[in-house]
Amino acid sequence: MIALTDRDRALIRAAWSLGLATHETLRMLVSPQTRANTLRRRLGQLHRHGYLTQTRHVGPGGCIWLYGVGARGLTPGEPRPWRPSLAQLEHTLTVGDVLVALTRSGFASPLVVTGWQGESEVRAWATPGTPFPDARVTWGAEDARGVWLVEVDRATESHAAWRRKLVRYVTARPSGTVLAITTSTARARGLATVASEIGLQLLATSLTETLLTPNPTVFDASLRRRCALANASTEGS
């Protein structure tokens, strides 16, 4: 037996929420100040005691270890954890990268992220038949509060498929703004155009902008303009 710390509990919760995640994603979301080797050893301990699972994966970047919640990490009554299939795995890892970017210090200032839910957690609580995003992020500012319903697009679906997905959002009338993060500026513009045509409140930007820019430029489907994410979010809240 090991005594769980608050950091351990946060790591277990993050692994459950994400479905599967790399060591670095968990470190950046939970304890970025902790040295990589230190956290890696602790993840190994949590795995050996059944709180986390550990899976070896060979992907485009080489061999990596992925962590999910273990049997001892679940609380009574908690939904069975969703895990991505092999075909979905790269998408899930990209969702983790996006969450790290959206929750990093100073991102989209003066907005401050107040909470997040990963892919597995969103699926666990989604109502049958309604659309659900890849992640859900709550944020606050001095005079505004809001939610980003994050959709990560790796350009594996056609615009027709995306239109069908976005129409479901219009029908469901979700509380939040769809934030589509895709492969290029051109594709972001195209997704925003589709959303504008069907009347959906959507912001679209590229993965590069999200990962590398403190306040990425987005296409605002409602107002048909380009502006900074912080401005588009607060004006639409």
Image (cartoon, rainbow, N blue to C red):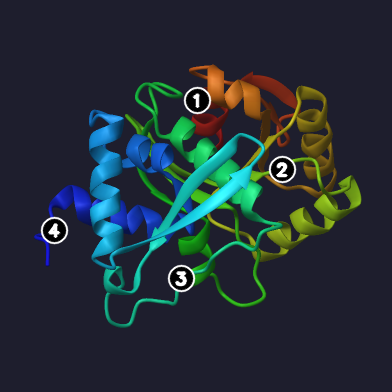
For disc 2, the marked residue is: 153
In contact (CB < 8 Å): disc 3 and disc 4: no
Real-space CA distance between mark 2 and mark 3, rounded to the nearest whole angstrom: 23 Å
Q: Position of residue 38 (x, y in %)?
A: 23, 36
Q: For the view shown, which residue lies furthest in the bottom direction?
A: 77
Q: Nearer the viewer, mark 1 or mark 4?
A: 4
- Vertical arrangement, residue 35 with respect to residue 117, above or below: above
Real-space CA distance between mark 2 and mark 1, rounded to the nearest whole angstrom: 21 Å
For disc 1, the marked residue is: 230
Question: Which of the image's four quarters has the N terminus?
Answer: bottom left
Q: Position of residue 196 (x, y in %)?
A: 79, 40
> Residue at image x 36%, y 53%?
14
Image quadrant in which you'd find residue 71 = bottom left
Q: Amino acid at mark 2?
A: Asp
Q: Nearer the viewer, mark 2 or mark 3?
A: 3
Mark found first going from the N terminus, 2 or 4:
4
Q: Which mark is residue 186?
A: none
- Asked which secondary structure carries label 2, the reply is loop
Real-space CA distance between mark 3 and mark 4, rounded to the nearest whole angstrom: 20 Å
Q: Residues within 10 Å of mark 2 (few under 14, many from 20)?
A: many
Q: Which mark is residue 81?
A: 3
Real-space CA distance between mark 1 and mark 3, rounded to the nearest whole angstrom: 33 Å
Q: Is residue 152 visible?
A: yes
Q: Is residue 56 left or right of residue 113?
A: right
Q: Is residue 44 left or right of residue 98?
A: left
Q: Nearer the viewer, mark 1 or mark 3?
A: 3
Real-space CA distance between mark 2 and mark 4, rounded to the nearest whole angstrom: 36 Å
Mark found first going from the N terminus, 1 or 3:
3
Q: Amino acid at mark 4?
A: Leu
